Image: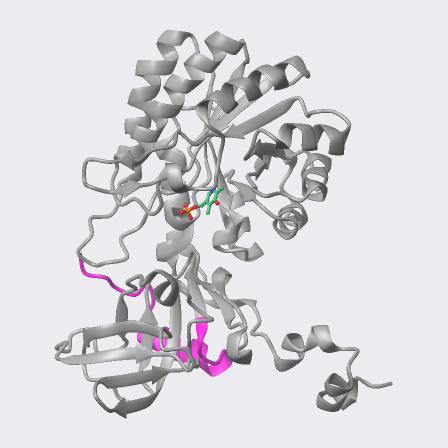
Amino acid sequence: MEKKPFVTKEKIEEIIKTVPTPFHLYDEKGIRENARAVKEAFSWNPGFREYFAVKATPTPALIKILGEYDCGCDCSSMTELMLSEAMGFDGNHIMFSSNDTPPEEYKKAADMGAIINLDDFTAIDIVEKTLGKLPKRMSCRYNPGGLFALSNGIMDNPGDSKYGMTTDQLFEAFRVMKAKGVEEFGIHAFLASNTVTNEYYPKLAEVLFKLAVQLQNVTGAHVTFINLSGGVGIPYEPWQEPNDIRAIGAGVEKVYNKVLVPAGMDDVSIFAEMGRFMMGPYGALVTKAINEKHIYKEYIGVDACAVNLMRPAMYGSYHHITVLGKENAECDHKYDVTGSLCENNDKFAIDRMLPEIELGDILYIHDTGAHGFSMGYNYNGKLWSAEVLLKEDGSFEVIRRPETPKDYFATLDFTPEYKKMFPEEQQ
Ligand SMILES: *Cc1c(COP(=O)(O)O)cnc(C)c1O
């Protein structure tokens, strides 16, 4: 499928007059349409809720849009909890799916009334000690071990992952927690990442639904929700077939009717914690070609770098690139598109066939709406970019200003060097 920007070149040129490149741009219309489609796909389940994985895009203006579709927040740190609380989400709309958790974060989550999803058996004691007693509603994260395979070859390796409890631990956890007064139980698992197949959620659901029936039968614990977590992917590559959320919802419904309903568990709510699927395609990194270099290969240097989008450097991920205004030009030039970090992996594309790029051209890097801005960092003293929302009515709004040198140096504000750089700060 051809990948097209969600914005025109003219609009981008207008935005650049106010907001210098690089910046991440988000598409309100796309976010809303997709959130609506997700809600509809699971409308057969009255308790369904998507808890957006805050780590994917921790930007209040965007998460609040999802909130309008009754989405909640999936958090795994103190600051994510703080942000979710400040955005006005109540406890029923906050899932705390953390791991290697500092006890004070359980305290914060419990104070907010959030659902605590335990990553490990040993956490039961820790939560009990920290809170005085266990909350009435608790969830446990499951790791079946071994390999998790789907028919199109996508596979992940739960046996090699740090998350979740073993099957035996899960049964024991339910027994112990029930004895300690827990009344409502949830089960959670995240077994494969960025799956581009409609098969993943239904297959995961089957594993978890069967487990839920056994857990309820054996321990007597009342399972009230099953959390399919994240892992529903997006087609970063133009030749990939996108997931169809309606087919995914219908696939889960089929397994629900086959496994849970006959077991008398037709009141179980389905939860999700998608990040990438909710936001990924509706963000783009907008950057300008500022240098060219002709050595053993042809390089185009842009004003963004890996601190703005780490996925290519970290995972070798493909992100499609459109050279704005040259959509119909022939891709007859082979480039490495690089950032300015003193790191040779700082490349947005390697050996990519693109139209001939001239300095000043605007490059639109697709699918940065999730795990894009949020994975940023400050290596080489590079600053965080702005985030801009393209609204449904065609106007735009800066939803996060760019970082300034003063922000970057703020934690040195007690040093003589800071005082030298920002003398105007002195009273
Ligand atoms: C990262 C994460 C998610 C979201 O994953 P996506 O691949 O973005 O859908 C959901 N739940 C947990 C616990 C996570 O760590």
| Residue 266 appears anywhere in the view | no
Whether 14 is among the magenta residues is: yes
Location of residue 135 in the rendering, given as x and y in whole percent from the top left corner? 68, 25
In the image, residue 170 sits, relative to residue 80, either above or below, namely above
- The residue closer to the viewer here, 345 or 186, is 345
Tell me what residue is drawn at x 36 percent, y 27 percent. Answer: 205
- The residue closer to the viewer here, 155 or 395, is 155
Location of residue 48 in the rendering, given as x and y in whole percent from the top left corner? 46, 29
How are the colours assigned in the image?
one colour
State which image quarter holds ligand 1. top left
- The residue closer to the viewer here, 171 or 181, is 171
| Residue 107 appears anywhere in the view | yes
In the image, residue 182 sits, relative to residue 425, either above or below, namely above
Whether 185 is among the magenta residues is: no
Tell me what residue is drawn at x 21 percent, y 78 percent. Answer: 326
Location of residue 261 in the rendering, given as x and y in whole percent from the top left corner? 37, 12
Q: Give the image quarter of residue 358.
A: bottom left
Left or right of 214 on screen, residue 76: right
Magenta part of the chain:
1-23
Left or right of 223 on screen, residue 202: left
Location of residue 273 in the rendering, given as x and y in whole percent from the top left corner? 46, 40
The C terminus, quarter of image:
bottom right
Tell me what residue is drawn at x 53 percent, y 28 percent. Answer: 140
